[in-house]
Image: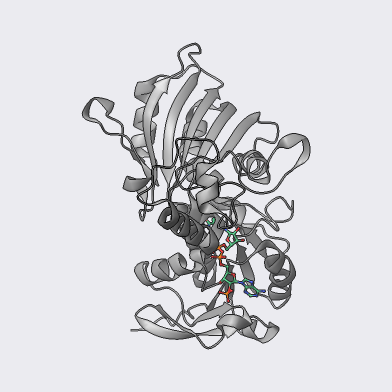
């Protein structure tokens, strides 16, 4: 009997030592093993370190052109400027790049892909690059995409409650340091007391995040909007194929380590019923409906962290609009919000090698 000898594609993970990289290595160890060699890459600072993947210790290489020799697919989980410089270099060597940074997401020659919503887009990649959306967009878009497919989305109004790991390792280290500084105190009773206790330990955040809520994520854009808010609007429009979709968004940082939450007010083309919305959410791939307030059941970051799906609860029809729904959504920003979606896209591309 003839045996098939399908070549397994070679994968590079660029940014393997980071917050997203660490989760990606776990996912690569948990998912079906479709890859041949897995090459780990980070900055020169990390060269020679060993990280566990698929039960083996693998050495980290410094990022340089030769690390892409023989690579089929590369996942980039590095800062924007590193992706902007290096993704085109990898692509010029024939590597298909799946990039997690913001460098290419709005480039019209780069598809922005969520496999549950627009998997077909991953096949058309004129620059050899596929972009992974921002973690805040990703934490809601699978649920919104499923509702859009049935009811036709007309408008989104969103507020986020974002975890500190969305700001990388530095974000998590900052919250831990601040929690140690405020532990056992009576802080939070007079203006500025938390700020004085935290001192210079603000890390990547403009205000203390321990014992606090900070209405800011990212950098300043026109007219007072933050870069994170613009990403949620622009990326949602691109993924859903609705370039004119009205999206109002306010992004807020909260003292949660991992898992972003969002309140969503969604208006649709037609009247909605909670019953049908619940059926859609209960059966949509990648979504868990957890919605029984009478029994105290609704998603929180503590439930969703470390899991793959988008969790949805508090499903209500808008009080004053029969075409509107109100939802509370939680998604692990490092899994579906970053590493899992990257892995899913890379697996779609790997399937092309096998075809
Ligand atoms: N955290 C999230 O929730 C999230 C979600 C979606 C997307 N993203 C995006 O994913 C990317 C990575 O985020 P992260 O949170 O994992 O960041 P992170 O924890 O700060 O890790 C950054 C990674 O990039 C590597 N790196 C930095 N400068 C480099 C250089 N000059 N050359 C090669 N490697 C370099 C670091 O290597 P060393 O360890 O050697 O410094 C590390 O592996 C960013 O673009 C981020 O915006 C993050």
Q: Nearer the viewer, residue 239 or 179?
A: 179
Quadrant in which ligand 1 is drawn: bottom right
Residue toward you, 124 or 222: 222
Query: Residue at position x 61%, y 67% from top?
Result: 78
Q: Position of residue 31 (x, y in %)?
A: 37, 66
Q: Decide: is 79 above or below 133.
A: below
In the displayed orientation, state which residue is furthest to the top: 320
What residue appears at the point 50 percent right and 30 percent down from the top-left corner?
Answer: 264
Residue that sits furthest to the right in the current view: 222
Question: Quick check: can you spot residue 330?
Answer: yes
Position of 157 relative to 206 (above/below): above
Please provide percent x and percent y for residue 279. Answer: 34, 30
**Residue 117 visible, this angle:** no
Residue 283: percent from left, percent from top: 35, 38
Q: Is residue 270 left or right of residue 231?
A: left
Up-down relation of residue 42 to residue 287 (above or below):
below
Q: Where the N terminus falls, by quadrant?
A: bottom left
């Amino acid at each position: 009997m003839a045996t098939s000898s399908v070549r397994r594609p070679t994968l590079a993970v660029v940014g393997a030592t980071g917050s997203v990289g660490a989760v990606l290595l776990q996912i690569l160890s948990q998912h079906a093993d479709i890859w041949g060699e897995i090459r780990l890459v980070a900055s020169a600072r990390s060269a020679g370190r060993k990280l566990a993947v698929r039960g083996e210790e693998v050495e980290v290489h410094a990022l340089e052109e030769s690390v892409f020799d023989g690579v089929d697919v590369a996942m980039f989980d590095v800062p924007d400027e590193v992706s902007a410089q290096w993704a085109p270099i990898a692509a010029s060597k024939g590597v298909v790049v799946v990039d997690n940074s913001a460098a290419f997401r709005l480039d019209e020659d780069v598809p922005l892909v969520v496999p549950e919503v627009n998997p077909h887009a991953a096949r058309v990649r004129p620059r050899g690059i596929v972009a992974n959306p921002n973690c805040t967009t990703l934490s809601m878009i699978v649920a919104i995409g499923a509702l859009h497919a049935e009811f036709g989305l007309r408008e989104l109004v969103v507020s986020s409650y974002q975890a500190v790991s969305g700001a990388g390792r530095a974000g998590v280290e900052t919250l831990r340091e601040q929690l140690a500084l405020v532990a056992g105190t009576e802080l939070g009773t007079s203006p500025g007391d938390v700020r004085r206790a935290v001192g210079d330990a603000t890390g990547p955040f403009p205000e203390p995040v321990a014992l606090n809520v900070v209405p800011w994520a990212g950098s300043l854009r026109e007219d007072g909007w933050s870069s994170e808010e613009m990403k949620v609007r622009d990326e949602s429009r691109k993924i859903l194929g609705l370039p004119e979709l009205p999206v109002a968004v306010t992004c807020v940082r909260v003292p949660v380590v991992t898992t972003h939450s969002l309140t969503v007010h969604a208006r649709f083309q037609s009247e909605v019923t909670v019953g049908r919305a619940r059926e859609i959410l209960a059966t949509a791939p990648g979504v868990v409906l957890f919605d029984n307030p009478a029994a105290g059941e609704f998603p929180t970051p503590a439930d969703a962290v470390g899991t793959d799906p988008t969790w949805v609860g508090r499903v209500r029809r808008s009080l004053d609009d029969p075409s509107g729904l109100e939802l509370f959504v939680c998604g692990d920003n490092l899994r579906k919000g970053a590493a899992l979606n990257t892995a899913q896209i890379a697996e779609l591309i790997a399937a092309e090698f096998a075809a």
